Amino acid sequence: MTRAGLTLHLSEHYGDSTPGAAIFIPVHDIDALHRELTAKNYRYARPGLEVVDLGKELNLTDPFGNRLRFCEQSPSA
């Protein structure tokens, strides 16, 4: 995944991570990221956008069961 000059490379190599891991990824303009992802025709990546205590969160799960949690803190938090 590449966005705003940053490339996120997901690895499936032994020892890189434990399957089922979760990572929080702070982003700016999570609404735009949500629109971008839902506009694509990805069969298994149709993320919802959740309002949580401190802002908004968008959750994806990769084919290996790892959770990518994109988050944006609300200005009032």
Image: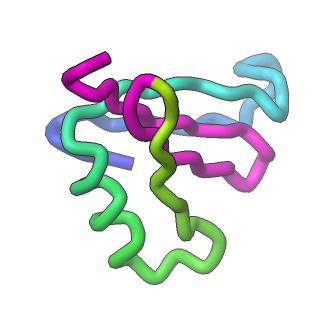
Residue under the point 58% across and 38% down: 68
Observer-nearest residue: 55 or 30?
55
- Number of numbered discs on residues: 0
Examine the structure image and report whether residue 58 is included in the region drawn in magenta: yes
Q: Whole-percent x and y of residue 76?
A: 24, 20
Residue under the point 29% across and 66% down: 35
In the rendered structure, the answer to whether residue 50 lies left or right of residue 13 reads left
**Which image quadrant: the C terminus?**
top left
Relative to 30, is 71 above or below? Answer: above
Relative to 15, is 29 above or below? Answer: below
Observer-nearest residue: 48 or 7?
48
As drawn, the residue found furthest toward the left would be: 4
Q: Whole-percent x and y of residue 37?
A: 38, 65
Observer-nearest residue: 53 or 15?
53
Observer-nearest residue: 41 or 52?
52
In the rendered structure, the answer to whether residue 43 lies left or right of residue 21 reads left
Q: Whole-percent x and y of residue 45?
A: 57, 66
In the rendered structure, the answer to whether residue 9 lies left or right of residue 60 reads left
Relative to 34, is 13 above or below? Answer: above
Residue under the point 16% across and 37% down: 5
Examine the structure image and report whether residue 49 is included in the region drawn in magenta: no
Residue under the point 52% across and 24% down: 24
Q: Quadrant of residue 16?
A: top right
Relative to 18, is 44 above or below? Answer: below
Q: Which residues are magenta?
A: 54-77
Q: Whole-percent x and y of residue 32?
A: 22, 56
Q: Quadrant of residue 12?
A: top right
